[in-house]
Amino acid sequence: MTELGHGRIETVTTYDSNTGEFVVNTPCESAQKYCIGGVANHATQMVVFSKLEINGKYQGVHAFICQIKDADGKICPNIRIADCGHKIGLHGVDNGRIWKEL
């Protein structure tokens, strides 16, 4: 998995102390996660590598398990999933891109 922007992680996760949740945000188009094999059609969860900020302080890069579809295969709110498009010779491979709607 990689981000469209390559070379640096633009995805930012913040801890919301009011809800006790981590909120993952892809702040720009180049922060989209590009994934290989089955993600757009079959995955319900994914691991997202993201910069973590708690109370405005950078805590380094962490891995988060994120729900992207429910048990019925319906895409979760605020999540966008799309195929990566034309692939030379491997059209049956489901390479996908995933990001949080802005």
Image (spheres, rainbow, N blue to C red):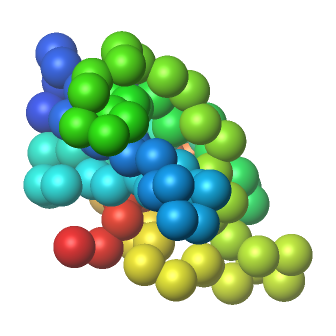
**Depth check: 89 or 102 in front?**
102
- Quadrant assignment, res 37: top right
x then y, percent, for residue 79? 45, 72
Q: Residue at x 32, y 40 (%)?
A: 55
Q: Determine whether 32 is above or below 73 in the image.
A: above
x then y, percent, for residue 88? 34, 39
- The answer to whether residue 90 of the structure is visible from this angle is no
- The answer to whether residue 25 of the structure is visible from this angle is yes
**Depth check: 101 or 39 in front?**
101
- In the image, taking residue 17 as reference, residue 50 lies left or right, namely left
x then y, percent, for residue 39? 61, 51
Q: Determine whether 62 is above or below 87 in the image.
A: above
Q: Residue at x 18, y 55 (%)?
A: 27
**Depth check: 20 or 89 in front?**
20
- Quadrant assignment, res 44: bottom right
- In the image, taking residue 37 as reference, residue 78 lies left or right, namely left
Q: Residue at x 22, y 44 (%)?
A: 31
- In the image, taking residue 6 as reference, residue 73 lies left or right, namely right
